[in-house]
Amino acid sequence: MKNDELIISSEQSIENIIIDSDTASFNKDVIEASKSAPIIVDFWADWCAPCKQLTPILESAVKAYKGQISLVKIDTEKNKELSQQLQIQSLPTVYAFFEGKPIDGFSGALPENEVKEFIKKVITATGGDKIKELNKLIEQAEKLYTDDDYEGALASFSNLLSAEVNNAKIIAGYGKCLVKLDRIDEVTELLDGLEEDMRTDKNIASLIALNQLAKANKLAGSPEEFLADVNANPSNHGLRFKLAEAFLANDQKEEAIEQLLDIVKKDRNWQEDKARKKIIKLLEAFGEDDPLTASTRLKLSSILFA
């Protein structure tokens, strides 16, 4: 299976709340990430029986906060230098990081109630209510965007940016509004100003994909230019692909996806898998929060694995 086919899997990470990391990625995954929200770091090893008891408890407790806190897991056997730098002397060891620094921690496999109490204490100490309120404001801005109120959404995301300049979700929302308002120069300036680590964030990747899609749409034409020809030549995948692009340019996403799925169903290998690859790019541009993403992934899966 090719790497870009992984996007059709039904097993998606929950907003990257729980990830495995290593020495090379520790700065990005923990130090930088903890500047936006608290991070719990679980230092473990495969030979450590108490680790295997603690990790599932940590995962469950972190998931319960739905994004207010994240869990990063470090295999100490594969990252010995990092473990030495952080003076990990026994396993399991858990550290809580916030604003780039460790703020609390414990060693040993605590019972579930004590783990929950530890995480609750970290959330409270790092302004958990503030994070919850911020997420609510982001949801409100995203709702404006979904309702096609791009000016209103832009104003909301702009206000949020003044408070959280390094929040990838806010940056991406702001940028997507600029794309929809055809303020392409500002989008380019926004993207050019981002650090390389930020550009790999899934929210920013979605913005980049949407921006590329918008540029392509300018040359797509209107659906009416292709509908009659496609109906008269239903086996002409080139015409159907152009119709899909025209639907996209007209912001008719579902119609575009259906045309592309039709090509994949009839001839997946057409022009080196062009239709499926287009769908993958579209899902990246739509983002995981778009209901069309999940439904399209299921449809694509049923076609590919029929």
Image: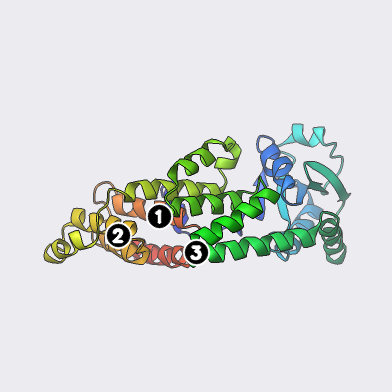
Q: Distance between the residues labelled 2 and 3?
A: 28 Å
Give the labeled residue for mark 2: 260
> Who is closer to the viewer here, 275 or 84?
275
Q: Which of marks 1 and 3 is in front?
A: 3
Residue type at mark 3: give it. Asp
Residue 149 is tagged as: 3
Q: Which residue is drawn at 72% across and 66% down?
A: 64
Asked which quadrant contains residue 89, the reply is top right
Comes first in the chain, label 1 or label 3: 3
Q: Residue at x 49, y 49 (%)?
A: 207
Mark 3, Cα crowd under 10 Å, few <14 / some 14-19 / many 20+, is some
Residue type at mark 1: give it. Leu
> Who is closer to the viewer here, 49 or 56?
56
Comes first in the chain, label 2 or label 3: 3
Q: In the structure shown, which secondary structural element does the residue marked by tag 2 occupy?
A: helix
Comes first in the chain, label 2 or label 1: 2
| Cβ atoms at labels 1 and 3 below 8 Å apart | no
Residue 115: percent from the left, percent from the top? 84, 61
Residue 282 is tagged as: 1
Q: In which quarter of the image is the C terminus?
A: bottom left
